[in-house]
Image (tube, rainbow, N blue to C red):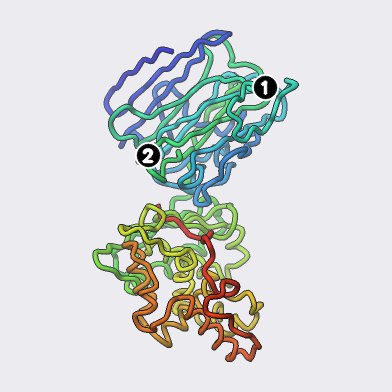
Amino acid sequence: MKILQSCAGAVSSVLLTALAARGEIKVVVEHNHGDRAAGEFKFKNIPSPSKGDAATRANFTIVAGTRDPAGADLDKLNDGRLPTEADQPSENFYFNVATTGGRLLLDHGRVVEIKQVNTYSWHPGARGPQVYRLYASDGLAADFEAQPRRAPDLEKLGWKLIASVDTRPKDGDPGGQYGVSISDDSATLGKYRYLLFDIARTGADENFDNTFYSEIDINRGSTTEVTPTTSATIPPFLSKSVDGKCDIAIDTSGASDLKEWAETKLAPVLAEWFPKIVAMLPSEGYAPPASFSVTIRPSRGVAATSGTRVTANAAWLRRELEREAIGALLHEEIHVIQLYGRRGNRGEAGRRLPGWLVEGIPDYIRWFLYEPQSHGADDVWMKRQKFDGVRYDGSYRQTANFLNWVSEKYDKDIVAKLNAAARVGKYGDEIWKEKSGKTAQELGIEWKTQLAKKLDIVWPPPAANSSTNNAAPAAASDTVTNK
């Protein structure tokens, strides 16, 4: 394999050629640094992403690995819509935090002639470069396996290696915008039904180094017009927190019918409550984010937060406009302000705040301070729950009720103390014992016992060392990771 590399200004280009049976497979790489990176993904020798290529009619499937819930769904890879800035998780597909990548299968539904495969990524740091192997198959071999999860020898399963891609720079900042184009200089790549992208992490960061893939295009050699498109067909609505210290952007380009609601109903609440929440969650040396964004678009679930970026499911919001929509996004704004660190919320000392508290603190502020009239986590709500399953570490509303009880009976500053400890990785039972003399588990038993009496529910409390009713779970699965 021979490698030719040239650099001009802020743009670098790499041409890798590999001998193949039909001719030479060319892998062209271009890297836009800094100001040269823009939403149009313009390169010197690689076409900008298209919304009319063959991939738009193909189907993507994850056959190995797990999608990061803070990122976009698989349809982001072939919808022709691009991120508008470098660090935009909701506009990129990427594999989960601290995993080793995964495999993506692209199925055209039938055998087609493929001329060119182009992949695009964008991130200011370790998630920018692309590292993967591209395999292809017509699916006709007797030993063909369509979804080879982690099988090491794909060529024994009916797959052909087309190219190996590694755009990591040998030196300098890895951040920026990358375009990769794979083609055959004398013919098409071949006739295939399936393409398999065997994707690896970049290895540049302990946890956060799975590439932000913005688009994957397949060119079958037709005259289809290449049409670059960005996600911001409607400019984001910009506002400031009432103290003027935080810029808030709300993007409704993926749900234009929610534009008026977002600007007149949602934005004022986020602006008003930002400084209030900051005041509720102080800690030494803490500086709140100077900006954050909310993107409303079709997605799964309700909402998710990654660093200073919130993504909300447009369909769910439409159903909840008069009920929970604003409160749910206030919950996400609190995650933005929590800012518990990039490495799994471990902070400097490495003592992680449990996931039930990461979620319980925002729900406490939401249900007991922002909208107590909604009775979304108080005793009115508790009365409707199946009491045997109620736990102090049950996360979200259950933990919110527990925190409210502790703050009223033992320590009015308990939430602020837990939050401050989380930011430096110093969470522990000593925080609970300071005013109450009890561990979190012991407080949980007392809380549930008193709650049962208040609600007139017969419930025998377990022994203090029981792990059946109030013990913390072995692993919290609902932790929101701030990146």
Q: Nearer the viewer, mark 2 or mark 1?
A: 1
User: In what quadrant of the picture does the N terminus appear?
Assistant: top left
Horizontal side of residue 415 vs 82, given as left or right: left
Image: 466 above or below 100: below
**Is residue 104 visible from the viewing direction of this image?**
yes
**Is residue 264 visible from the viewing direction of this image?**
no
User: In the depicted view, which residue is nearer to us: 253 or 334?
Assistant: 334
Kindly identify which numbered label has been placed on residue 158.
1
Q: Earlier in the sequence, mark 2 or mark 1?
A: 2
| Secondary structure under the numbered disc 2 in the rendered image | loop
- Judging by the rendered image, the residue that carries numbered circle 2 is 126
Name which residue type carries label 1: Gly
Image: 109 above or below 312: above
User: In the depicted view, which residue is nearer to us: 20 or 344?
Assistant: 344
**x and y, in percent, of residue 27 in the image:** 46, 19
Q: Residue at x 42, y 38 (%)?
A: 122
Residue 107: quadrant of the picture: top right
**x and y, in percent, of residue 246 in the image:** 32, 62
Distance in Å between CA atoms under marks 2 and 1: 33 Å
Q: Residue at x 60, y 25 (%)?
A: 153
Total labels: the figure holds: 2
Q: Are marks 2 and 1 in contact (CB under 8 Å)?
A: no
Residue 23: quadrant of the picture: top right
Label 2 environment density (alpha carbons within 10 Å; few <14, some 14–19, many ≥20): many
Kindly identify which numbered label has been placed on residue 178.
none
Q: Residue at x 36, y 56 (%)?
A: 341
| Secondary structure under the numbered disc 1 in the rendered image | loop
**x and y, in percent, of residue 15 in the image:** 41, 17
